[in-house]
Amino acid sequence: MSLVSVTYGLSITTIVLFGLVAMILAHRRQKVQKDTTEFFLTARRSVPERTIAWSFYASGVGAWVITAMPAYVVSAGIVGLIAYSISCGLPIFLVARVGAVLHRKYPGVLSLGDFVQWRFGTIPMIIVTLVMLLNMFIALTAEYTAIGNLFEQIIGGPRLPIVLVVAIVTSVYTAAGGLYVSILTDVAQGVFGVLLLVIMAVYVAVTYRPESLPTPLPETIGANYWGWAAVGAMPISMTCATIFSEGPWQRIWASADERALKRGSIWGALGLVVVCFLYGFGGFLAMWAGFPLADPYGSTGFFDLLGAGKDSAPAWIVVLAALSVVTMNEGCVDSLQNAIVDTLASRFFRGKSVWYPRVLVFLINIPIVFVSLKGYNIVILFLIGNLVCTICAVPLLMGLVTRFEGFITGWSMVSGIITGFLSIVVFGYVKTGSMADGLHYTFVESYDWPSFVLPLVFSFLGSMLTATVEKYLRMACGFKYPVPLTLPPEAAGSEHGVESPDSKASSLRDVESYGPDKRAAEMK
């Protein structure tokens, strides 16, 4: 049998088996208790510490890791790899801390968009929702692209069949079980993927015997400008992208309590850092040894390492690597599907039948699968999404600061986003001497540190300046602030983020009946 047929057969079997496990779990849950739309989307306070830790890990790691991490080494070297790896885990830890505060203050929200609606109003909510959807669509496109690249470039088969299998299987069990079942399958997928990585690490330790290793490191993989730029760019980039992904927020809502959230996020973040580094380090070792790269951009670096400089690696280790990739891919894809559905359903299907978001799971995949077949550069896809998120992050987070309540409004938030974008336009123009070339440089070409630092600074300054002007205008005209400072008493939970059964049931009922739109109307 050929490598293509064996790899396809085992990969599809692995994907389907995980799907069957998910369907069994969903069936058992439905026999015990029928899910409400709210629980389908958030799995509110149902997941213990260890499970949520694996879920944070499995939802963050994906097929993109095995291609994007080595590819980044080509330009940013070992310093960039370290910065990128740390930045893969750090946002989980940070967002979990922010999420604990958000959940304590606004226990009834179903999504980040809900919070923005409560705090800033309709227009900022629309902006944030669009940014989140763009960010998650890009991430899901990158996942389908990565798994397609693996089978087309490494295995030598067509990309469409494996992409369709992943999309269909994950859509079926996501529609059946929602977030809760997705989180349970994350454990099995995470453990299986880590075991395969351990086997591959042992194999590399035994077979990695290059003739010579140049010292000092060549400039391309040693400490260079892009590596040091990554120290500033990547933590900001990845943190802002994580903020504008509903997946981590869903796991915040799903955590059994604040202790489970904090400890689970730490273990999940550590797992992400280690695994992302190991896959990227594999590409680094291949480049350091001078092994021929099947892809000049470095995306095949890990597989080139498995081949140890030969035309191809042994078939069995390639199959194991492929199984590892499809497992990570499946766990990440179902998490992204749940996240996108949550973002849309919490805005349009609040209080409606759970079948609305279930149908939505299938519909969102159609255009994303089509785009992924184009095979766009994954690193560039992430750059576009990450930069857009960076522009919007600070004005959004200012809404969580208690001192800014009654000062930072929807107007100042939107103004901050505009000034953040203008700072990138000016930087690109100064860098290249052309407006068009500058936008291409910042959004398509490079992870340069000013592209991520400047929006943070100027979006904050823009928000503060607008808020100050607005304050004096309101004082002069006698207008009150429209900012809703607190949720209605019946939608609030108890202190420290732990709800009593009565308050919890009350908040869940009121989430359906007392939505942000109604509150916005009352504020008028």
Image (cartoon, grey):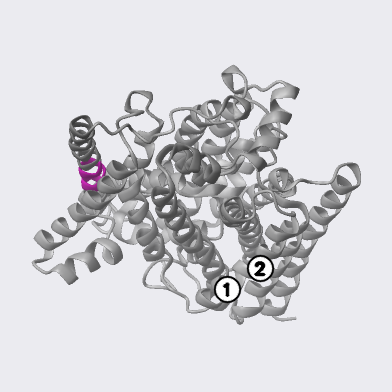
Look at label 2 and name its amino acid: Ala
Query: In this rendering, is residue 172 above or below 85?
Result: below
- Who is closer to the viewer here, 503 or 161? 503
Q: Which residues are magenta?
A: 453-459
Q: Earlier in the sequence, mark 2 or mark 1?
A: 2
Q: Which mark is residue 167?
A: 2
The residue depicted at 66 percent of the width and 58 percent of the height is 327
Q: Mark 2: which secondary structure? A: helix
Residue 459 seen by the camera: yes
Q: Is residue 200 left or right of residue 403?
A: right
Residue 303 image point, x, y percent: 52, 65
Query: In this rendering, is residue 504 above or below 393?
Result: above
Look at label 1 and name its amino acid: Val
Q: Mark 1: which secondary structure? A: helix
- Our reading of the magenta stretch's main secondary structure is helix
The residue depicted at 30 percent of the width and 66 percent of the height is 444
77 drawn magenta: no
Pointers 2 and 1 in contact (CB under 8 A)? yes
Residue 355 image point, x, y percent: 75, 59
The residue depicted at 24 percent of the width and 49 percent of the height is 420
Query: In this rendering, is residue 153 above or below 327?
Result: below
| Image quadrant where residue 131 sits | bottom left
Provide the residue designation for mark 1: 369
Cα–Cα gap, marks 2 and 1 = 8 Å
